[in-house]
Image: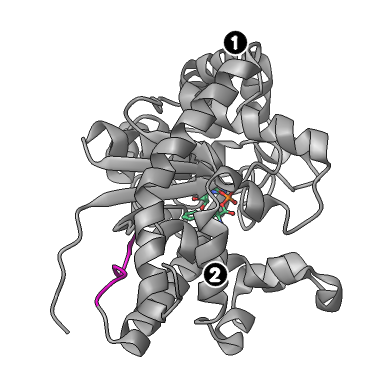
Amino acid sequence: MTEVAFTPRVFSGIQPSGGLTLGNYLGALKRFAKAQDQGIETIYCMVDLHAITVWQDPEKLRHATRELCAGFIASGLDPEKSILFNQSQVAEHAQLAWIFNCVARMGWMKRMTQFKDKAGKNAENASLGLFGYPALMAADILVYHATHVPVGEDQKQHLELTRDIATKFNHDYGVDFFPITEPVIEGAATRVMSLRDGSKKMSKSDPSDMSRINLTDDADTIAKKIRKAKTDPEPLPSDADGLADRPEARNLINIYAALSDQSVDQVMAELGGKAFSEFKPVLADLAVAQMAPISAEMSRLMQDPSEIDRILANGADRARAIAAPILKKTYEIIGMVGA
Ligand code: TYM
């Protein structure tokens, strides 16, 4: 097989399953905006087909998809520069996912930790879609021949599976057709933790609202949540090494570093040795200054849902123009008549 050079192209997705958190912002949205502004082609998707792998109320799903789109734009994604769309409008995702269902092996899927976590004790009652979720995710990425995928740490295993699927497809059909995608998991905030428990990921599904900052929280709520965030009794250590066994302190420092675009070492040089009573107000001010305008912009955008629908439809047209020829070529490779 000859090596094929693929043009750099960034793809990533977020589920419209209700509510964006600071984890989504720092681990994904803020980094998506950075990639866009580096002049690489960027494609970002509201993955509504993934959301329905667990039950979604139809009205809430529609609302969450529009709100997610508002969250993208409010976080700096420009629908002219990036392609923004919802997955179900581009049928090629589901079509390629079927092919990948036939490439991926049961054993690979059974090893996915996110399936085990989400299915919980009652895996027999989980939807087949939840089990096949990572094959659809591989299709999202590979239907654009995307080369780079910025995500948080929790998606790493899914991206390894995407590489396995591309490799097996290329090998089975003797082609160099799908790129072996690079996960981009960089920066201080690839795993933002709960504000109540430094060993748990910050998540929209945590029963405690105090555990997370929502992108829709107002300034007072953001400041209160940071003031009440769990800490330990010691002051901050003098350097990054001292954060090793202090998950809550490490999390707040990581959040500060990501919000202020600094490395953890830079932050420790500025704030090392301070008491939490001094550090927390500084962090709260920074979080409010950065997050409150996003929340205000989201509410403004949500006042005009038809404009959001227009943006999504336009993005879907642009996405389809890239995906359709790649799917057609895939059909040809696998021997579908009429492709
Ligand atoms: P989702 O919707 O759970 O999360 C969207 C993005 O936010 C990141 N993230 C976090 N990052 C840091 N700290 C956290 N606490 C945190 N919580 C969430 C996630 O890592 C992710 O980057 N399966 C994906 C959606 C998806 C996708 C794709 C992603 C579908 N197809 C193709 C990339 C490429 C998911 O459920 O993300």
Front-most of residues 35 and 314? 314
Q: Is residue 147 above or below residue 67?
A: below
Quarter of the picture containing the N terminus is bottom left
56 lies left or right of 152: right
Residue type pointed to by label 1: Arg
- The C terminus, quarter of image: bottom left
Provide the residue span drawn in magenta: 176-183
In depth, the one of 36 and 169 nearer the eye is 169
Label 2 sits on what residue type? Ala
Could you tell me how far apart the alpha carbons at marks 1 and 2 are, in whole angstroms? 36 Å
Q: Secondary structure at mark 1?
A: helix
Measured as percent of width and height from the top left, residue 40 is found at 23, 41
Q: Write the residue at 52% across / 47% down.
A: 90
| Residue drawn at 45 percent across, 34 percent down | 315
> Is residue 197 highlighted in magenta?
no
- Say above or below: 45 vs 112: above
In the rendered image, the vertical position of residue 245 relative to residue 123, given as above or below: above
Indicate which disc residue 300 carries.
Answer: 1
Q: Residues within 10 Å of mark 2 (few under 14, many from 20)?
A: many
Do we see residue 257 in this rendering? Answer: no
Residue 334 drawn at (x, y percent): 41, 79
Up-down: is 4 above or below 221? below
Q: Give x and y (percent) for residue 159.
A: 44, 66
Say how many tags the image has.
Answer: 2
Residue at the image point whose x is 60% and y is 10% from the top: 300
Q: Main secondary structure of the magenta part?
A: loop
Which of the numbered marks, if any, corresponds to residue 135?
A: 2
Camera-side residue of 313 and 223: 313
Mark 1 or 2, closer to the camera: 2
Residue 209 shown left or right of residue 276 in the figure: right
